[in-house]
Image: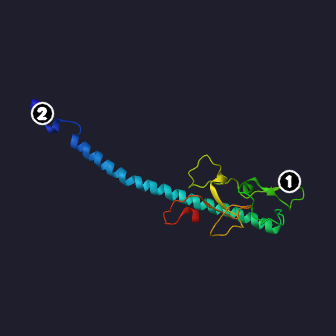
């Protein structure tokens, strides 16, 4: 009877070597999975950035189009582009409305730059702005918002920089 008690067939549980092999395999799988999750996270932020750029640029173009058609008032010294990004959300008076009470809204909300690592800043401060008067090779903010870009100097997965999108 004592022989059965100490035999391998009578024992229950795992040996130390079996536990070490299992932990080693799990550690190896974790080291392979972590870079893949990081890559997926960066891809997701890049898709979000592309979508935000398209949305804001389409709203800027709609503002300019409505200014050119006379639905939005502008003075002679203005370019016809929105004065700020917030003007796209806050709305502007519709000149075609005779009561003067209707506004035109171009965005429901202003998206944040997903590449910006500044959670305390309002969404309009997370974007780099280019005015109509600034040249394309040296964009600067000015009296209006002609275009936007990310402020991030990071490199995208395709090798370009986010600020050049």
Instruction: Give the residue drawn at x 73%, y 57%.
Output: 84
Residue extending furthest toward the right: 98
* Residue plotted at (9% across, 33% down): 3
Can the viewer see residue 1 in this picture?
no
Q: Residues within 10 Å of mark 1 (few under 14, many from 20)?
A: few
* Image x and y of residue 120, in percent: 61, 46
Give 55 or 134, whichever is nearer the viewer: 134
Task: Please name the residue that numbered disc 1 is placed on.
Answer: 101
- What percent of the width, then of the height, locates residue 158? 49, 66
The image quadrant where one finds the C terminus is: bottom right
Quarter where residue 18 is shown:
top left
Tell me the distance, in whole angstroms, between the alpha carbons under discs 2 and 1: 94 Å
Identify the mark nearer the N-term, 2 or 1.
Answer: 2
Which residue corresponds to mark 2? 4
Q: State whether residue 70 is above or below residue 102.
A: below
Q: Are marks 2 and 1 in contact (CB under 8 Å)?
A: no
């Amino acid at each position: 009877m004592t022989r059965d008690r100490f035999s391998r067939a009578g024992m229950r549980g795992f040996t130390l070597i079996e536990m070490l092999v299992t932990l080693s395999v799990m550690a190896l799988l974790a080291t392979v999975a972590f870079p893949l999750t990081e890559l997926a996270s960066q891809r997701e932020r890049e898709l979000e950035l592309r979508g935000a750029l398209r949305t804001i640029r389409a709203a800027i173009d709609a503002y300019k189009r409505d200014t050119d058609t006379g639905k939005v008032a502008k003075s002679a010294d203005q370019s016809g582009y929105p004065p700020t990004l917030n003007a796209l959300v806050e709305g502007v008076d519709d000149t075609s409305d005779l009561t003067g009470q209707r506004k035109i809204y171009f965005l429901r909300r202003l998206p944040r730059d997903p590449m910006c690592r500044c959670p305390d800043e309002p969404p309009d401060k997370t974007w780099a702005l280019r005015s109509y008067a600034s040249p394309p090779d040296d964009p600067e903010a000015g009296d209006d918002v002609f275009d936007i870009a990310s402020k991030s100097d990071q490199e995208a997965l395709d090798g370009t920089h986010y600020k050049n999108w």
